[in-house]
Image: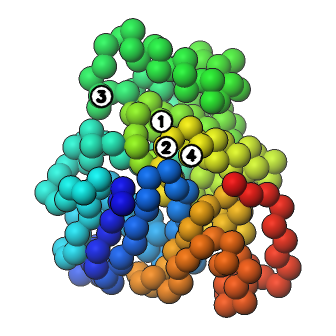
Amino acid sequence: MLLELRDVVTRYGAVEALHGISLDVAEGEIVSLLGANGAGKSTTLKTISRILAPIAGEVRFDGASLDGLEPEDVVARGIAHVPEGRKIFPGLSVLDNLRLGATPRRANRATIERDVDEVLAIFPKLRSLGAKMGWTLSGGEQQMLAIARGLMAKPRLLLLDEPSLGLAPLVVKDVMETIVRIARDGTTVLLVEQNAHLALQIASRAYVLETGRVALSGDARQLLASEEMRRAYLGSAVRVEAGR
């Protein structure tokens, strides 16, 4: 198993946000974390990337514990975190944003430029925007740049936090198709997403969080058809339009 969380407890000060979360992600999967606002989805990603340190339980990546590591050490191990809100550098160009994504690897310039070219092949629209400042990009372009910058770290596991948030439906479709392509090219994805319908269409498995606990988990197709899932998260009219 590439990623394992076992009985993980995480707090914000005195407030316990995760109450013994356990989950697994196998290499090559897209696994979705679903749930309402405040369920603990983003906290789970921050715990994996060591932005937050759990007070109990264990996070293991490729068989090794991440306990005691700093966030930059986690990136070096092969985990990249694309946070909610994109967090690109608005005063830097698209190309410079991408180059900064390779910083933890300490690669030479020639290697970085080769990797930039490879990433731009996945996001061809960004190629024509290379000299544009981050702040001039549309929301969809900024989201693509954030994901592309995450890939510049050459991760084995990509943590994506709400990549569809605030985007138009056609842009969301492009983002989801890109995530599927990334996984097919060999990068494992753990996806936090409020649009449960879309997330379940592209994922192989999913976990549903409620107030810091796993309420449901299983095969994405089975969850998509589940009456319990439908009532709580999907509404009455659910139709599968795409698949991985």
> Residue under circle 4?
183
Give the residue displayed 39% in from the left and 34% down from the top.
Answer: 153
- Provide residue 169's location: percent of width, then percent of height: 80, 53
Question: In the rendering, which numbered label is found on residue 187?
Answer: 2
Q: Residue at x 65, y 19 (%)?
A: 127
Q: Secondary structure at mark 3?
A: helix
Q: Name the residue carrying label 1.
A: 151
Q: Position of residue 122 (x, y in %)?
A: 63, 30
Counting labels gives 4
Q: Between tags 1 and 2, which lies in front? A: 2
Quarter-of-image position of residue 139:
top right
Residue 142 appears in the rendering = no
Q: Residues within 10 Å of mark 2 (few under 14, many from 20)?
A: many
Q: Quadrant of the C terminus?
A: bottom right
Q: Which residue is mark 3?
A: 105
SS type, badge 2: loop
Disc 1/disc 2 C-alpha distance (Å): 9 Å
Q: Is residue 206 above or below residue 20?
A: above
Mark with earlier residue (1, 3) = 3
97 vs 69, left or right, is right
Q: In the rendered image, which quarter contains the N terminus? A: bottom left
Asked whether the residues under the numbered discs 4 and 2 touch, taking CB atoms below 8 Å apart as contact, a structural biologist would say yes
Mark 3 residue crowding within 10 angstroms, few (<14) / some (14–19) / many (20+): some
Give the SS element for disc 4: helix
Alpha carbon separation for disc pair 1 and 3: 12 Å
